[in-house]
C-alpha cells in the first residue's frame, strides 16, 4: 500500500486514494474549516496542525502522530505546493524541486525569468511597509495584486498614483493582508487559460480555454466563465498555444508536472500572465475530465509518486463551457432545483457549493467564491456560449 501525504482536504484526492487503495494522511489547520468536512474514509488519517504554512508545526505534528513514512507528498492547494516539495525531499525517495516551484508562486520572479524571450506585462514588486516606494515609473492603468496570491483575491485595477497609494496604505495598516504586492501594466485583449502537463521537458498534454471576459471583470459583478476549444477544429490555435506554453515552461524549468497558465491574446499572439505548477481551480479539472476523460488530479498524483505518465491524446467531440453561479438575494433563500436547469439542452452538470443559512459568497472578492458552477457542452463555441447565457439567466430567474 502506498502512503500519500497531502496539505488540506480535497474530495478529489480522497476519492483517488480510496479507489487505488492508498493510505491518505491529510494535514489540516483552521483554514480547512474542519467541522464542515465529511467524515474520514477508512483509508484516511487526519492530522490537525497549528499552521500548515509552518514547516516546524507540520513536522512536529507528523512526528507526534508517528506518520513519517510516505511515498508521495502532494498539495492540490496552491499555497502549499512549495511546502509539499520540501517535505517530499524529507520523507520520500522523490527529490523535491522547491527552487523551481517557487517560480510558480512568486509572480514577479516568473515574469523576470521569461521576460527576455516571451511577451509579458511590465511589472515590479512592492513591499507595502517600505516607506521609500518609487512609483514614478509605474504606468497606468495598472493591476495590483498579491505577489503569491490566487483567485484574483486582493486584486485591483488602479488608474493613477493616488489610487495605488490608497491600496498600498490599506495593506500597510492591515498586516493580516498580503504585504508583498506586484504592480503590472494592464493588458488589453482576450484572457485565456491553458492546462496540461510537462513530462521530461516536453508538453505532453494541453487544453486551450478562453474566458468570456477577463477575470478582473469579476470585480464588476461578472461571473467567471470560460469555453474550452476542441483541438480537432482549432489546430492553428493549439499549435500557437503549444509553442508558447512549452517554451515558457522550459524557461521556468518545469520538467515534470501539471500546470495552469493564464494568458492574454491580442493581434500579435499570446502574452504571458501567470502560471501555477498545480491543477487549475475548480471547475477546470471537471471540464477536462468530461471533455477528454483525463483526471488532472490523478496525473498530478502520479508525478508526485515519481512515476511515468502515459501519453494521452487530447480529443473531444464537443466544446465545453462552464460558469460560476452568482450569490442569492439572501442567505435564507432557497437554491433552485437542479432539475430546472437540466431541462436546458446542453447542460451537463449543476453543482452547488453553498448551503442556505451560511454567509453569502462574494465573487467580487475572489473567483473561488460562488454559489456553485454549471457546465455545458455544444457543437460550437457559439452554441456553448448561448447555452451558458441561457442557463445563467434561468438560474437568476429562479432565485
Image (spheres, grey):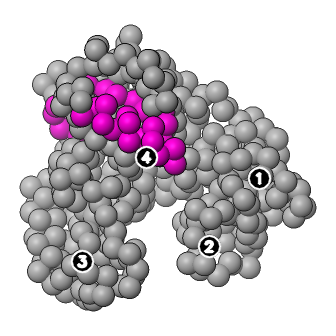
> Would residue 190 be counted in the magenta stretch?
yes
Q: Which residue is mark 1?
A: 58
- Going from N to C along the chain, the mark reached first, 3 or 1, is 1
Residue ID at (43%, 46%): 150
Q: CA distance from mark 3 to mark 4?
A: 24 Å
**Of 385 and 127, which appears nearest the observer?**
127
- Going from N to C along the chain, the mark reached first, 3 or 2, is 2
- Going from N to C along the chain, the mark reached first, 4 or 1, is 1
Q: Which residues are magenta?
A: 163-192
Q: Which residue is mark 4?
A: 150
Q: Is residue 144 left or right of residue 69?
A: left
Q: Which residue is mark 2?
A: 34
- Going from N to C along the chain, the mark reached first, 3 or 4, is 4
Q: Position of residue 134 (x, y in %)?
A: 37, 16
Q: CA distance from mark 3 to mark 2?
A: 25 Å
Q: Position of residue 271 (x, y in %)?
A: 27, 26
Q: Position of residue 275 (x, y in %)?
A: 43, 36
Q: CA distance from mark 2 to mark 1?
A: 17 Å
- Going from N to C along the chain, the mark reached first, 4 or 2, is 2
When asked about the image quadrant of residue 158, the answer is top left
Circle 4 packing at 10 Å, graded few (<14), some (14-19), many (20+), is: some
Q: Which residue is mark 3?
A: 328
Amino acid at each position: 500500500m502506498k502512503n500519500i501525504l497531502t496539505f488540506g482536504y480535497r474530495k478529489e484526492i480522497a476519492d483517488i486514494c480510496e479507489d487505488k487503495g492508498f493510505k491518505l494522511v491529510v494535514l489540516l489547520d483552521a483554514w480547512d474549516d474542519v467541522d464542515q468536512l465529511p467524515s474520514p474514509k477508512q483509508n484516511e488519517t487526519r492530522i490537525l496542525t497549528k499552521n500548515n504554512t509552518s514547516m516546524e508545526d507540520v513536522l512536529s505534528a507528523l512526528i507526534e502522530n508517528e506518520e513519517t513514512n510516505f511515498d508521495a507528498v502532494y498539495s492540490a492547494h496552491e499555497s502549499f505546493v512549495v511546502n509539499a516539495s520540501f517535505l517530499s525531499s524529507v520523507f520520500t525517495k522523490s527529490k523535491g524541486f522547491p527552487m523551481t516551484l517557487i517560480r510558480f508562486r512568486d509572480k514577479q520572479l516568473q515574469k523576470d525569468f521569461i521576460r527576455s524571450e516571451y511577451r509579458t506585462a511590465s511589472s515590479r514588486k512592492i513591499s507595502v511597509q517600505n516607506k521609500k516606494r518609487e512609483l514614478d515609473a509605474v504606468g497606468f492603468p495598472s493591476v495590483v495584486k498579491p505577489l503569491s496570491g490566487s483567485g484574483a483575491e486582493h486584486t485591483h485595477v488602479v488608474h493613477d498614483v493616488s489610487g495605488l497609494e490608497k491600496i498600498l496604505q490599506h495593506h500597510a495598516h492591515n498586516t493580516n493582508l498580503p504585504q508583498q504586492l506586484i504592480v503590472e501594466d494592464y493588458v488589453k485583449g482576450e484572457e485565456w487559460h491553458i492546462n496540461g502537463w510537462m513530462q521530461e521537458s516536453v508538453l505532453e498534454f494541453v487544453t486551450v480555454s478562453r474566458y468570456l471576459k477577463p477575470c478582473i471583470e469579476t470585480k464588476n459583478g461578472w461571473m467567471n466563465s470560460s469555453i474550452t476549444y476542441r483541438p480537432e477544429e482549432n489546430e492553428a490555435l493549439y499549435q500557437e498555444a503549444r509553442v508558447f506554453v512549452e517554451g515558457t515552461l522550459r524557461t521556468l524549468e518545469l520538467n515534470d508536472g501539471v500546470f495552469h497558465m493564464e494568458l492574454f491574446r491580442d493581434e500579435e499572439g499570446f502574452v504571458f500572465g501567470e502560471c501555477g505548477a498545480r491543477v487549475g481551480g475548480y471547475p477546470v479539472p471537471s471540464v477536462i475530465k468530461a471533455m477528454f476523460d483525463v483526471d488532472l488530479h490523478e496525473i498530478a498524483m502520479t508525478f508526485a509518486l515519481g512515476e511515468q505518465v502515459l501519453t494521452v491524446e487530447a480529443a473531444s467531440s464537443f466544446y465545453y463551457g462552464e460558469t460560476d453561479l452568482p450569490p442569492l438575494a439572501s442567505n435564507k433563500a432557497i437554491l433552485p432545483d437542479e432539475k430546472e436547469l437540466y431541462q436546458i439542452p446542453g447542460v451537463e452538470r449543476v453543482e452547488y457549493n453553498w448551503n442556505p443559512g451560511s454567509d453569502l459568497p462574494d465573487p467580487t472578492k475572489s473567483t473561488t467564491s460562488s454559489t456553485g458552477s454549471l457546465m455545458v457542452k455544444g457543437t460550437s463555441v457559439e452554441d456553448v456560449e448561448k447555452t451558458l447565457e441561457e442557463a445563467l439567466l434561468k438560474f437568476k430567474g429562479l432565485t
